[in-house]
Amino acid sequence: MPDQSLPQAPTPEEASDQAVPGNARTAEGVSRRRLLGTAGAAGLVLGAAGGAVGYAARPAETAPLTSLGSDEVMFHGKHQPGILQGLQARGHLVAFDLTPGAGRKEAAALLRRWSQTARRLMAGEPAPHDDTDVARDAGPSSLTVTFGFGHSFFARTGLEKQRPAALDPLPDFSSDRLDKARSNGDLWVQIGANDALVAFHALRALQKDAGSAARVRWQMNGFNRSPGATAHPMTARNLMGQIDGTRNPKPSESDFEKRIFVPAGGEPAWMAHGSYVVVRRIRMLLDDWEKLSVARQEAVIGRRKADGAPLSGGTETTEMDLEKTDANGDLAVPINAHARISRPDQNGGAAMLRRPFSYHDGIDADGVPDAGLLFICWQADPLRGFVPVQRKLDRGDALAPFVRHEASGLFAVPGGAAEGEYVGQKLLEG
């Protein structure tokens, strides 16, 4: 779990600068259902400017929690939704395999259906066919739906020549204990929202849309802290209790686009403005972790548990001093501390944008919680983003004894769909 982790809340100035044009619905475009779902909410906030803590949006600190239902992310845009937006309270990850006999034609029809459904649900409207009414009383609640293609998709659709080199399978890592049945897949869908019923409604609608063209390969559920649960916006904590996300790259950085998104004119052309996502189910061995003293936990991570500040001193955002020593002459930040090893400047500048969810899938028969992190990271090239950092962690991360990588996937996520288009159209009809 690299230290470049969960998105950090931007300053108010950054939040204003980072709003994506065309991603905020104006008052004239508000749906009837959205108004019904948020009627009576004081301080009604419209569009991306009122979204959850994150890059494209930040709510006013005094906004009531009930206003969250009105927040809407636009489906159409330069990038797909669900990458630049802030962390959402509920998420579902699901991979599909095309059914025997289904090929390029069926895949194109499926992505067309999925895109239509995603656009309507993200606007707070009912699904186009056989809506279940699960989210009938809610507004959009920052719903985002994101689609990607796995390595196997291209052979199944006869598009091998269009498969990106960056989609080559990830190397093996010593910490891997991967369940193949819960890894990879032809198609990948990420759903996020700030309301659990809105998120489930989208999951169910997209599953029904798959029809006879695709079947579910695996599905995982995640959560984050609800926006408004803290006195002020702050970096999230993971299930180990650590502040997690201080060094996530920010859109305000000059090289952000280059590191996270495939440029226009890049190869293949259909991936312009898209990104590659690595998805890992990382189980946290919480019983073992919680036996450690706070001081020992901090030494493993390299940061203070209370406020996320580096052990070399300062505040959460203070640059870590890798050379500082304590009164005994020992390094203040241990040589194998997770935060030290995963720093971009210790990995050739490797960077990735993380938007993970925590998960908890119950208690095992022996009383051990099945809980941890649904690790989701975005980069222009996984061979320059995820892979070098994970290789470095694999060789000596102090956190390694307390986590186990149980599932993995790599997917090509094309750029956003323009008005009148569906996601992946340039690939499937090019």
Image (spheres, rainbow, N blue to C red):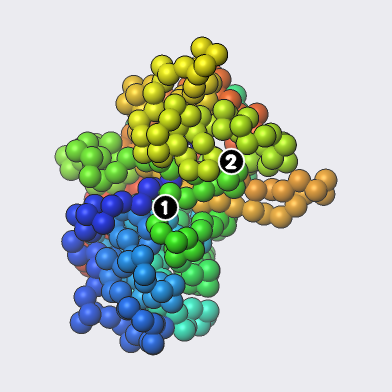
Residue 395 percent across, percent down from the top left: 54, 19
Q: Is residue 192 above or below residue 410?
A: below
Residue 89 percent across, percent down from the top left: 49, 61
Q: Please tell me in which quadrant of the rendered image residue 82 appears.
A: bottom left
Residue 300 percent across, percent down from the top left: 57, 29
Looking at marks 1 and 2 on the same chain, the residue that comes earlier in the sequence is marked by 1
Residue at horizontal 67 percent and vertical 34 percent from the top = 293
Q: Please tell me in which quadrant of the rendered image residue 419 appears.
A: bottom left
- Name the outermost residue toward the front: 327
> Is residue 418 rendered to the left or right of residue 281?
left
Residue 281 percent across, percent down from the top left: 57, 43
Count of residue discs: 2
Query: Which numbered disc covers residue 282?
Result: 2
Other residues around mark 1 within 10 Å, as few (<14) / some (14–19) / many (≥20): some
Residue at horizontal 55 percent and vertical 51 percent from the top = 358
> Is residue 330 rendered to the left or right of residue 342?
right
Q: Is residue 164 above or below residue 323?
A: below
Q: Amino acid at mark 1?
A: Met
Element type where label 1 sits in the image:
loop
Can see residue 151?
Answer: no
Q: Please tell me in which quadrant of the rendered image residue 278 appears.
A: top left
The residue carrying mark 1 is 234
